[in-house]
Amino acid sequence: MLGTGTSLTSRREFLKTTAAISATSFLSPNLLAAANAERSRPQRLRFGVNYTPRKLWWYCWLDWDQSSILQDLQAVAKLGVDHIRIPCLWSLFQPGISTVSESALRNLRLLLDAADSVGLDVEVTVLNGWMSGLSFLPPWTAPLLKPGDTNSGNIFTDPLVIAAEKLLLSRIAESIGSHRRFLGFDLGNELGVLQRPNLNPVSSMDADSWAREMLAFCDEIAPGKFHVNGIDHSHWFNDFGFTRDEIATTGHASVVHSYIYFTGILERFKYSDQASFHLADYMIELAYAYQTDLDRPVWVEEIGIGNKEMPESYKPTFMENAIRNIAATGKAWGITWWCSHDIDPKNASFSDYEYALGLIDLKNQPKPLGKKYAELIAELHKSPAEVPARSIAIAIPDRGLTSVQWPADWTFATRYMNLIERGILPSIVLEKRAHDEAYLKLRGITEVIPYPR
């Protein structure tokens, strides 16, 4: 993330001025020097975790145990993190289209109180119809469905459902909006998973329109907070659902979820290859290429590794390489690891992959990966990572990837990773900006590799 100050205001105004006319002659040496100085200055990353309670997972919203939650968060805080991200299971918080659970709202306030006691900010993810491989769409959407009508019951296009969504967001804002630990709203966990031909089918135009409307509503009911759309990787790797232009320009940060297990990188590289270490920074650089505001941060909202990607003993090594590469972009707001705690095997129904993703075990003790995370946080807070120049950029078209959700399309990413394997740390620019000299100078780019045609 770029720093703040008058130089950034000048840069923002400069970019507005150059949008319609060539600005090479307006690019003063002082402005360029200020921009480059801001870019190379080490930035303080925020570190956090996606919190998963030891006791009952997130079914704990129904059977609340404040003592257990507090113990969990005390263990989380000892890692040195400053924030957590949490999900409100939609079906539990809004059991009826016009009904919001008062007990769920109370428990949410209690969780923020517990977080406050250990110094943790909380990003609240609200419209969670899908979490950890399970569906939590509220049951009242089903009766709204009408044969042949793709809008009926659709969480992105049905006015009745959208009104209910706003009701839930409003009630949560009323309950915790003024809490000093409330960081902001995340619209929902990986909502693109619910954009399927047979479930909430939606065009990219309508998906983008929904996101703009909902994020604007969040700003209205909870002004000054950090509101985002917590999408998964599919929108960055495919021309699917929310467009890259939209997710890189709406909300208060661009969000990336980086998993070598789900993105298909292990079909192309080994877990110990440089390409695997650079997946997250590729996604950051891709998001940054689509942004129109060079001051806008990118949030690595989820990154994690399980037991199917690599040996347990190698996980700390992978974590260290990935986090250092994220920090070296200078563009990240923060890193929020998935996840805090392992899931108790007594909680059946999850896939095998989900149970051992935690940094902390079921006795609230840090695992080797948790200890490594704590070490890296302490080090990078004391000595922020240097941000190396990325003077070589690859150009990509605005679109041009597959329009299906799965599998991930590597047409853009392969070019980036090939350069990484050659020891080159590239930037990414859109073709429409590849000849904008003012823009390239602001980013410190001196060479653009054209997109092959």
Image (cartoon, rainbow, N blue to C red):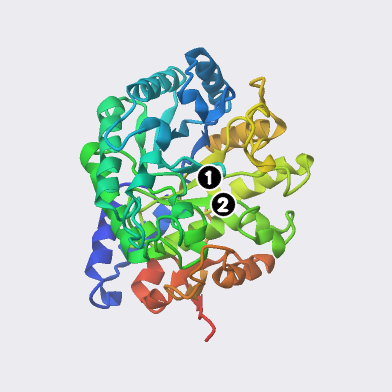
Q: Is residue 199 left or right of residue 158?
A: right
Question: Residue 36 at x, y = what percent?
Answer: 41, 59
In space, the residues marked 1 and 2 are separated at their CA atoms by: 6 Å
Residue 224 sits in quarter: top left
- Amino acid carrying label 1: it is Glu
Q: Is residue 222 left or right of residue 317?
A: left
Callout 1 secondary element: strand
| Residue found at the very far top of the displayed protein | 67
Above or below, 157 against 312 in this view is below
Question: Residue 202 at x, y = what percent?
Answer: 37, 61
Question: Residue 214 at x, y = what percent?
Answer: 28, 48
Which of the two labelled residues, at mark 1 and mark 2, occupies the earlier sequence position?
2
Please tell me which residue is depicted at 40% across the width and 19% down the height of the picture.
110
Q: Residues within 10 Å of mark 1 (few under 14, many from 20)?
A: many
Answer yes or no: do the residues labelled 1 and 2 have beta carbons within 8 Å?
yes
Using the rendered image of the protein, determine whether residue 248 is visible from the camera's viewpoint.
no
Please name the residue that numbered disc 2 is placed on: 258
Please tell me which residue is depicted at 52% across the width and 31% down the height of the picture.
51
Please tell me which residue is depicted at 46% across the width and 32% down the height of the picture.
83
Residue 178 sits in quarter: top left
| Residue found at the very far bottom of the displayed protein | 453
Please tell me which residue is depicted at 29% across the width and 67% down the height of the picture.
28
Using the rendered image of the protein, determine whether residue 74 is visible from the camera's viewpoint.
yes
Residue 275: assigned label:
none
Q: Nearer the viewer, residue 165 or 338?
A: 165
Callout 2 secondary element: strand
- Amino acid carrying label 2: it is Ser
Residue 356 sits in quarter: top right
Please name the residue that numbered disc 1 is placed on: 302
Q: Nearer the viewer, residue 200 or 52?
A: 200
Question: Residue 135 at x, y = what percent?
Answer: 50, 43
